[in-house]
Image (tube, grey):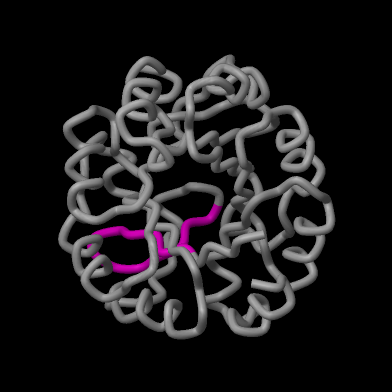
Amino acid sequence: MILYPAIDLKEGRAVRLLRGDMAAATVFDDDPAARAAAFAAAGARWLHLVDLDGAFAGRPRNAPAVEAILRAVAIPVQLGGGIRDRATAEAWLEAGVARVILGTAAVEDPDLVRTLARAHPGRVAVGIDAREGRVATRGWVEETGATVADLARAFEDAGIAAIVYTDIARDGAMEGPNVEATAALARAVSVPVIASGGVSSLEDLLALQGAGGIAGAIVGRALYDGAVDLGRALEALGA
């Protein structure tokens, strides 16, 4: 299972939100590129970036910070937030982002996801963010009637690289991930599933790994708070 240290960007700084609430942002680092370099130096194989302002605006808003991170590290980076058209997705791929994550677009413009996945094999992921099993979009402020499983199955044959599944109620809350729901999703589809939201300890990571079938886990606040030591976690996960 791959561990993805998370850097969520708001106004150029690394922050963490509580359950997706922009008004409940905690600033952890004014230099996200330095933080990215530290994660890479500790042995991380991937980084997970989110342009939070972009997710709400519907277009990139933290490009300078993302570009600085790309210059600072040699490991692959996946990026989500505000990527809702082909031009934006391909601009990021050309800039050096290894994988773009489309969330709102996966609900509102699924053909875009399919087109991008065909054009860029292995470089397009779908982000599924949900409250109580129902998908939310546009920075998690708009809830849809779509279920997690139905949306995931809709892209089963699209050639996407992964599904990033976030339980919004757990995100940033340090209350543990939704292991059961994530494992159920991983069993329901053949696409690799990456867990996001709630990881608060090494035990949480081991529980996700032990559930079977979960390809990766994103860790944010627990790394910044020191609840999870990145080096020890990577060693424990066999990464």
At horizontal 76% and vertical 64% (from top left) the residue drawn is 204
Figure check: 191 above or below 19: above
The residue nearer to you, when weighing 27 against 207, is 207
Quadrant where the C terminus lies? bottom right
Give how far across and how far down residue 29 sits, in percent: 35, 77
Above or below for 76 versus 71: above
Residue 1 in the figure: left or right of residue 43 = right
- Of residues 132 and 63, the one nearer the viewer is 63
Q: Please tell me whether residue 105 belongs to the stretch shown in magenta.
A: no
Q: Main secondary structure of the magenta part?
A: strand
- x and y, in percent, of residue 90 in the image: 21, 38
| Percent of width and height locating residue 171 | 59, 52
Q: Which of the 4 image quadrants contains residue 218?
A: bottom right
Query: Which is nearer the eye, 38 or 134?
Result: 38
- Indicate left or right for 32 with 78 as reference: left
Give residue 215's position: percent from left, percent from top: 65, 50
Q: Quadrant of the N terminus?
A: bottom right
Q: Which residues are magenta?
A: 6-18
